[in-house]
Image (cartoon, rainbow, N blue to C red):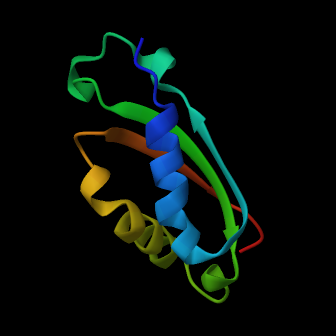
Amino acid sequence: MINNDNLIDLMKERLASLEPKTLTIRDDTRLHEGHLESQGAGHFKLTIDSEQFAGKDVLSCHRLIYNALGDLFPHRIHALRINLLNR
């Protein structure tokens, strides 16, 4: 199994630009082992709360997140489930 601790640290560094009040990232890669589509990239669940999301719709919030993580897709992150808090 791939250890994604360094990747999670990198994701947190990148997402710090959104000044999150809450930020947790769970590695769910083990639940998808053997899926050909992922080709070694990870599956993650992100829970985040940020003042920068205030007044924005879900799609706009997701864009901010994807812009912060941009080049990590698709080679390091295959799937990202996003849970926005207190939007």
Residue at x 21% of width, y 24% of height: 39
26 or 54: nearer the viewer = 26
Which quarter of the figure is the C terminus placed in? bottom right
Rendered location of residue 77, percent (x, y):
34, 41
Residue at x 30% of width, y 62% of height: 70
Compared to residue 38, the image places residue 84 above or below, namely below
Rendered location of residue 46, percent (x, y):
58, 49
Q: Horizontal placement of 42 versus 57: left or right?
A: left
Residue at x 45% of width, y 45% of height: 80
Q: Horizontal placement of 10 versus 84: left or right?
A: left
Residue at x 41% of width, y 72% of height: 63
Rendered location of residue 78, percent (x, y):
32, 38
Compared to residue 67, the image places residue 35 above or below, namely above
Which quarter of the figure is the N terminus placed in? top left
Compared to residue 31, the image places residue 54 above or below, namely below
Q: Horizontal placement of 5 versus 76: left or right?
A: right
Q: Residue furthest bottom?
A: 55
Compared to residue 36, the image places residue 79 above or below, namely below
How many numbered marks appear?
A: 0
Q: Horizontal placement of 48 versus 27: left or right?
A: right
